[in-house]
Structure formats: structure tokens, C-alpha cells
Image (cartoon, helix red, strand yellow):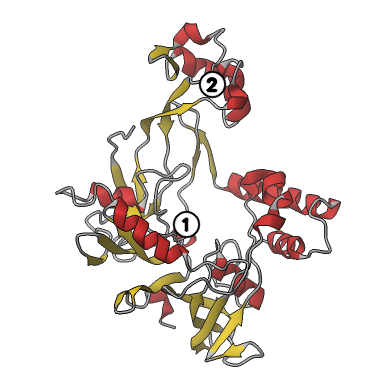
Amino acid sequence: MKTSVEHFVHNGLRKIKPYYHTSTTFVKGRWLNRSILDVLIEEFKSRNKDFYLKEIINERIIVIRNNLEIKGSQLENLKLQNKDQLKLIIHKHEPSILNFNFKNNYDNDNDKIPIIFENKDLLVVNKPSSIPIHPTGKYFNNTLVEIIKSQDIDGRYNKISPCHRLDRLTSGIVILAKNSKYSSFIQKLIQSKNIDNDKDFVSNSTSKYYIARISGKFPQFSSNFNNGTIVCNEPIGNIDVKLGFNSAILNKNSSIKPAITEFQLLKYNSKLNESIVMCKPLTGRTHQIRIHLKYLGFPIVNDPLYGPNSSKIRYELMMMIKDPKIANDSQIVKDLFKSLELENRLNLEKKNSNSKCKICEEIEFNDPNLKDLLIYLHAQKYEIKINNNEFLKFETEMPEWSNI
């Protein structure tokens, strides 16, 4: 259920005032014949037993059975059954994102998402850094789709949906469809770009070009030089610590996939020892460009995960699980993963303001550094081949940080 919320801009950040958000989900098979309190403690570990008891008493945790709400003291001895629904009324805290015009006026709240192209079926925008494309995790209203909808005064964008992914920190072109039919059409063209097991390329219907600012002097020629580009074809398998060891590591053999990216040097600044490169991913793996630049030894200068100052433990673990000679369940892999979990936890604690929300006990964090909310990677050009005679081509200006 969508709730009316209020946003404001402060210190260069677009913030959402905490609000109550209602979500409803069917109970899972592993929840059956268990008490609601047992399920909440086991499945939602961010809160303790006392907190959930208080929420039950305040009727913000409800079970729906046969279209009737069961709440308050009625939940005390209730066992969950098949087809039950769990209704949670959550006091939601959304993370802040960069104000769109933070470089020119920290607290200007009049800017809108820049539109590159629009017709009856498509909306193409230039996404600023730090904004997730669609609701995910703790983000809902501070997402590209919801911000565009909130700025829509005549209902043109009520049904927009993104046709592809773009990392939260990455800026640049995002293609959104205004209806489900065209969304499906564009997505099929884009997704057909992935490698399959039998041949290098499935089709040549889409081309994406990114701009990156990297550490070091990127070579113009190498053993991988081909048609003015340098090619990296290392397989991709990034690590998400939040998934836990079993999902993030043990199952990685099946999720490490082929990946190819072409790179071309555009500019080099000897004083900074930094380069601007054009990147053309020929596959669509998560963090592909960022990881490939790390593998080549020219990481994006401000990349928090793969940059020059990023975790050495993460990189060592990434290289290790790629090696077929090393078992993913070996003790050294387990120890590295535990070290990475600890490193992430300590980094998170540094952001803690040592205070909690008085309503929901959510841990409150200090405002992030504005520089930590962007990365020098920009989706600058997108080309889609509709048929032999028709192309869609979208392009933005070069990002300001590329002027070195």
C-alpha cells in the first residue's frame, strides 16, 4: 500500500520523513504451524522479542485469515495456516540520496529528473548518481520511478517501468516504458544481448557505451588490442555478503558467468595519473565494468567496492572463488568470508549516530558524505536496433567529472 510521504532537501541530500508503510504477504511454507512471534524473531532478526510483542499489542502486526483480521491478544496462541496473510504496518526509514542539483545549490528542491527523449511509449532520462531505479530494500519513494511519478501532474507516467538495470551509484541513461507491451518489447531486445553457452553473442540488437574515470594510464595498445579497443573477457561473479556464506560463495560456481567488455582510452591526465575511458559491455553482468577495470589494474578512482582504496579482502576472495583449483568450501575461503563480513559490519557501525528512532527503534545513521554517493561511471550512449531500418539512439553530454 502506497502512503503519502513528505520529502525535503538538507545539506545536499534529498530526504524522506519517516512514515508508516503497510505491506501484506502470504505466509511461507516454513512458517506453517508456528506462532507469529516465533516467525518474526527467526525471519526478521533486526528487532528483538520485546519489540515484536509491543507491535502486536499496538495492532501493527496482523494476520488475515478468510478475509478477517486477527490482531492484538488474539495472536498470542495463534498458529499460522496455509493461505494466511501477514500484514505489517512498518515505520519506514528511507536512506537519503543526492539532491539532483547538489553541486550548484545544496538545498534547491526545484529540479526534476532530466528527460532526454519522450514519445507515447517511451521515457528516457539521465539518472543522477545515488538513486536506485525502482523500489528495493529500504528504498521506495527515493527511487527513480517513484520520483518521476511524484513529479507527474497529468498522469503520463503512472505506469512507467524500467526496461533495464543501472547501478544505484552509476549515473546516465535509463529507458522506461509507459506501457507493459512496449516494456516487454524493449526488454526482449536488450536481454537478447547476453552470452549463451553455445556461441559468443546471441544478437547485435543493443549497444551500450559508458564513460569511466580510472586510476592510472590506460594503454592504447596491448596483446588484447582489437579495432582500437582493449578487451577483457574475465568471468564475473561478485560477492554479496548480505546473502550469507552458502548463497554468496557455495553456490557461486553456477553463477560465475562469462563476461566481455571493450575499453578504449579517450584521455589521460599525467598530473592526476588518471584516464577517461569508453566502456562497451557486450554482456550484462552485475558490476561488470567495475570488476573488469579492477581485473585490468585500472579501477574507477572512487569506486567503494572495487576502487584503489576498496577492500583487499573482497578482491582476494573474488579471485579465489574464480579459481577452479580452490574449493569454495575450503577453510581459507570461509575465513576470508568471515573477515569480509566483519569488515562490512565495522564500516556500518562507523556510520551509526548512536541513536534510535523513538517510535520503532530503528538505528539512525549520520548523513553520508556527498562524495560517497556517486561513482565516476556514466551510461552515456544507448543504441537499440528495432529492425534493419529503424534504430533508437540516445545520448547524454559527457559528465562533468570527465573533464580532466
Number of labels in the image equals 2
The crowding category of the residue bearing disc 2, from other C-alpha atoms within 10 Å (few below 14, some 14 to 19, many at least 20), is few
Q: Which mark is residue 369?
A: 1
Does residue 10 appear in this view? no
Q: Amino acid at mark 2?
A: Phe
The residue shown at (26%, 54%) is: 178
Q: Is residue 261 above or below residue 338?
A: below
Q: Amino acid at mark 1?
A: Asn
Q: Secondary structure at mark 2?
A: helix
Q: Is residue 68 above or below residue 260?
A: above
Which residue is disc 2 drawn over? 51
Report the front residue among 182 and 267. Answer: 182
Query: Mark 1 or mark 2: which comes first in sequence?
Result: 2
The residue shown at (36%, 56%) is: 184
Q: Can you give x and y, in whole percent of width and height, for residue 100 in the image?
A: 32, 59
The residue shown at (63%, 72%) is: 294
